[in-house]
Amino acid sequence: MRDDHDSSERKALGLKREGLILGIESSCDETAAAVVRGGSEALSNVVASQMNLHANYGGVVPELASREHLRNVVPVVRAAVEQAGIRLEDVDAVAVTEGPGLAGALLVGLTYAKALSFGLGKPLIGVNHLEGHIHAVLMEARQRAEAPMELPLLALVVSGGHTHLYLAEQKSEGVWSYRNVGRTVDDAAGEAYDKVAKLLGLGYPGGPWIDTLARHGNPLAVPFRFAKIKPRPHREGVSLPNKKAPAKLEEGEESFDFSFSGIKTAVLRYIETHHMRESIDARRRALAEHPDWRPGSDEAAALCDAETLDLIASFQHAVVGNLLRQAFGAAERYGARGIVVSGGVAANSELRRRFQSEADKRGLPVAFPSLALSTDNAAMIAAAAWPKFVSGDFAPETLAATPQLRLGGS
């Protein structure tokens, strides 16, 4: 709850009830800016993608990403303000991603946001990128005027850099709390998609390629398995429903952590034992000669034989199945009233279909972001800043980029 000091500070700053927040996001390879009103109405959401640049290298090159952010941040912010139909002076606060992410990339957005905040005389709000992904879903639910999902929520944040499970609760109007109840111990799910796509000679990013091509294969052709992960013995800050003491997972107790490096290795072994190198090399050469071919094109699908399509479908089936088991298992264990799935992998069509089907069977609400808000964007940053704006939780001048920033007890 806000105290008298917070209320006085807000009045002194002359903050409007309208709550126009300018969000800036630059944690990886998307330079984004957005204006969101009241944490629920996105007036603009502009994203400058670097996808084509990094596709030449099969992954994000940090130095190049930082350089592109420097080029893009000013015009992107201008475009967001213009599309929102406001003046820069009209915003009530500037929100920016402080982490996690690439150090150089974060610094570009953070430095510009601090300069704007100082120049405009408006408060600065630092936002955790992972929290932003969660609030992308909550913001769109408010836009649709839906009744809010009952709390606590189990949030699966799954992308190229993150695979986390959080128990999310709102303590008051301006305070959310997050408890990490599962995380990847090695590769993130999206990273596994990218690496497997690269092994198979497909384009970058790998998610859209695998998602599209998997529809043409047999998902049960290759029986991939996930090994059981030993539980972390002391998971601080995680408590069971209606229990005050932190939960301490004992030996043999279920873990909700993830590991995706093993399935990547299994795909590599399958490629080697089934002598698929020649076809992979041919596919890689064809895509290099035709960079305009996209995952959904007939030419792209024709590059893969039945064995490759079965391998792709089986890989995706196994990964989505693992995400589903861990998420719903954690939701049941910790008494979640609903599930929120967010991050770039949340755009995956099989994931959405299977999660919705399982949720319907269990009578448990599940929500996803729109495709536009699944990947990195600034509307989610401005939305996540809204509760902080309401409570007067503003960042100090010393706010710094934190590449390994954690959310909750992660």
Image (spheres, grey):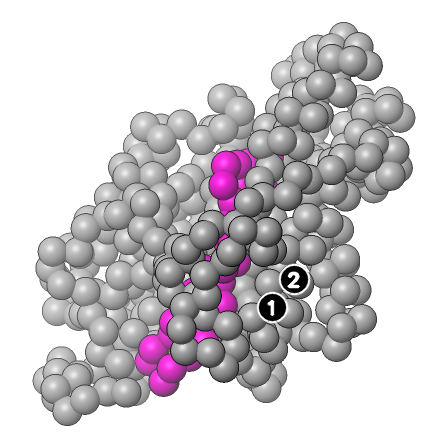
Residue 62 visible? The answer is yes
- What is the quadrant of the C terminus in the image? bottom left
Name the residue tied to disc 2: 329
Q: CA distance from mark 2 to mark 1?
A: 6 Å
- Is 258 placed left or right of 404 in the picture? right
Residue range of the region highlighted in magenta in the rendering: 163-192
At which x and y percent is residue 311? 80, 29
At which x and y percent is residue 26? 35, 47
- Is 22 placed left or right of 193 in the picture? left
- Up the image or down, 338 lies above or below 228; here it is below
- Up the image or down, 272 lies above or below 32; here it is above
At which x and y percent is residue 87? 28, 69
Q: Main secondary structure of the magenta part?
A: strand
Count residues near mark 1 (Cα–Cα under 10 Å), then give few for <14, some for 14-19, many for 20+.
few
Count residues near mark 2 (Cα–Cα under 10 Å), then give few for <14, some for 14-19, many for 20+.
some
Label 2: element kind: helix
Label 1: element kind: helix
Nearer to me, 119 or 168: 168
Assess whether residue 168 is covered by the magenta stretch: yes
- Is 220 placed left or right of 390 in the picture? right
Tag count: 2
Indicate the quadrant where residue 382 lies: bottom left
Q: Amino acid at mark 1?
A: Arg
Residue 381 visible? The answer is no
- Is 397 placed left or right of 382 in the picture? left
Q: Are marks 2 and 1 in contact (CB under 8 Å)?
A: yes
At which x and y percent is residue 27? 36, 46
Q: Which mark is residue 102?
A: none
Name the residue tied to disc 1: 333
- What is the quadrant of the N terminus in the image? bottom left
Which residue is drawn at the image coordinates 60% and 37% (left, top)?
Answer: 260
